[in-house]
Amino acid sequence: MGRRVLVTGLGTFWGGRVAQTLEKDPSVELIVGLDTTDPTVKLERTEFVRADQSYSILSRIVRATQVDTILHTFLVVDSTRMSGRALHEVNVIGTMNLLAAAGAPDSSVRHLVVKSSTLVYGASHRDPTWFSEDTARSTSARTRVERSLLEVEGYLRDFAQDCPQVTVAILRFANVLGTDIVTPITKALSLPVVPYIFGFDPLVQFVEEDDVIRSLEYVMGRDLPGAYNVVGDGRLPWSEVVKMVGKRLWPLPPYFTAASATPLTRMGVLELPDEVIALLRFGRGVDNTRLKRAGFEYRFTTAGAVDSFRKSQRLRKVLRPRPEYTYERDVEAFFRHSPAVVRPDIS
Amino acid sequence: MDPRPVCNAKFDPGAQAGGAGGAGGGWESVASVVVAGGRPSGEARRSTSLVPLPSPAPDPEPLPNPRLGDVDEWGRSERMRSVARRLYDPVYRHWFRAEWDGLDKIPRHGGALLVANHAGAIPSDAPVIMHGIETELDRPVYGLADYLFRTVPVVGTMWARAGGVPAHPDNAYRLLRQQDQLVLVFPEGTKGTGKLYKDRYQLRRFGRGGFVEIAMRAGVPIVPIAVVGAEESMPILWKSAAIAKATRLPYFPLTANMLAFGPLLGPVVYFPAKFKLTVLDPVTIDVPPDQDRYSRSRIMDVSEGIRHSLQQALLTMLAERNSVWFG
């Protein structure tokens, strides 16, 4: 019997891409995807369930499908996506429901992989140059997204102690760059002139999209409990990143930065949540040694990720954006379940 | 000229991270089990792993690292540093006329923690020591300084590019233990630079001896350096506690330089005091590195010992000094 996997956040970049990768893996018998919105990528055999944000039906799904692995990618790390309250609902309440389902006495779940973010370390002037997985934050979390992620990780740690039969792996991803993903950082880097905070040139890190998906897949198939930072080697000054992408810098004032950028953020030209401002001021360095020692091999360094982003940007200039895939329930149901469809036998 | 190979070597934290993991219990313990099999060189160790792990490729090819600049992981740029050296060299040679004694006691290889007395409202001793060692010994020195610097626009960035590192124990450990660098630290901190002229050359307390603990953990010698001249280069006559509190600065001084050169030039122009630097015998502490905890009393003991020897060296140097300006 192959693995039976539940992927939360199927509609997001993370969940969708991971599900696509898992579909190619013959040892994965079943993939159930869960989200509040329709998937945005084309999926062959993933079963999609639409749920409410806090996943209250999760325990029923887990019991009914007898999944052994849960891939929790539906943690919102980009606070521009939703209001603080909705974010709390998704991250904290959603995870609590998920843990309740996974930790039920008769639960079949044995692996839990959670996508977190290096936002849990914050970014402040008191930070060490490198954070390891065990380094504590140097200042208390001020933004809502950081607080919610810290709360989630706290629950996960408790869960790992209470349910020793479940292997809990937390992957803390640095800022992701790549072909498909859209974040405040990639939006800023796509502008004709890229903002920076005058007088600050922080050292930043990136991880490439492919490494993100590969690391999730890598950890899922193995017995690797605990937290792991996922980030490409090296740190780059923001000015160098911008130069590599081939853009010019545009200064934002070092004081009252958020207020002075308000016109631009209101117009939707720029997204500059507090955690991004902190990053552009002080940067962040996380150590990826632990995941490397666990045997994971990165394909991209930080500079490599920037380079790949630059190439995808150039390509985007030439090619129009691909037509978006739209999920149609009836069509998908037909292809998956109709006896009329001739399916290759996967057993 | 292509700085990339150097960058590559410097930038791969995995290559240098000798003993990063393994401290603490619980969650990490599993990771350290995994270490046994996951290391590229671990042919002999693989048998000890509890879980079967795929053996990594024997010698993985370095990933492409298409850099444009030469800023290292600490924010230091060798290019910027050499520009700074060229600009600062006349100041070092002709303004302060720095003179070293016992420079050969600074190790040429391996990590070492340099500690010195700290003085001058805007300390003039750090650049002199860093410049001196870099030009005479041709070794980079990373200067640890209060992280408050990082909050100041432009200054914080320039300071990082010129080799300054925020004073965090993890930073010092990584530099000393994993990268075998020279690290300069002023154990007095802002208490040393913020003291009045009447208290010159009287060492403040050495914090809680954190620098000793770092040297113990990293297993490197401590090299004390006694500096004479910095006190007179920018003496503090008076301090305003109220303004310091309002501006959240560690101290807000009125310096003799401000009176002499006015409020604009005062904060940046030093008096041409003669600098004399004496390197004392390196202190090696006989404890195993990488322990979770070191005896607090031992730490304070060593710290006090170093403070005492520095103070004695300063007094000897002062007793032999004929003139503040000519040495």
Image (spheres, rainbow, N blue to C red):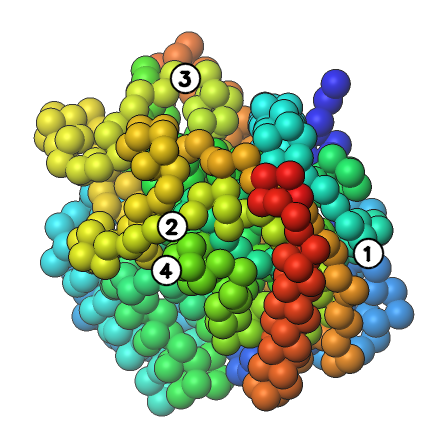
Q: Residues within 10 Å of mark 1 (few under 14, many from 20)?
A: some
Q: Which mark is residue A247?
A: 3
- In the rendering, which numbered label is found on residue B105? 1
Q: Residue at x 17, y 31 (%)?
A: A261
CA distance for labels 2 and 4 = 42 Å
Q: Which residue is mark 4?
A: A120
Please state the chain letter of the residue tagged with numbered disc 1 in the rendered image: B
- Label 4 residue SS: helix
Which mark, residue B236?
2
The quarter in which the C terminus of chain B is drawn is top right
Amino acid at the residue labelled 1: Lys
Q: Are marks 2 and 1 in contact (CB under 8 Å)?
A: no
Q: Position of residue A61 (x, y in %)?
A: 29, 70
Q: Is residue B152 above or below residue A32?
A: above
Give the structural element (helix, strand or loop) at label 3: loop
Q: Chain of mark 2?
A: B
Q: Position of residue B30 (x, y in %)?
A: 61, 77
Q: Earlier in the sequence, mark 4 or mark 3?
A: 4
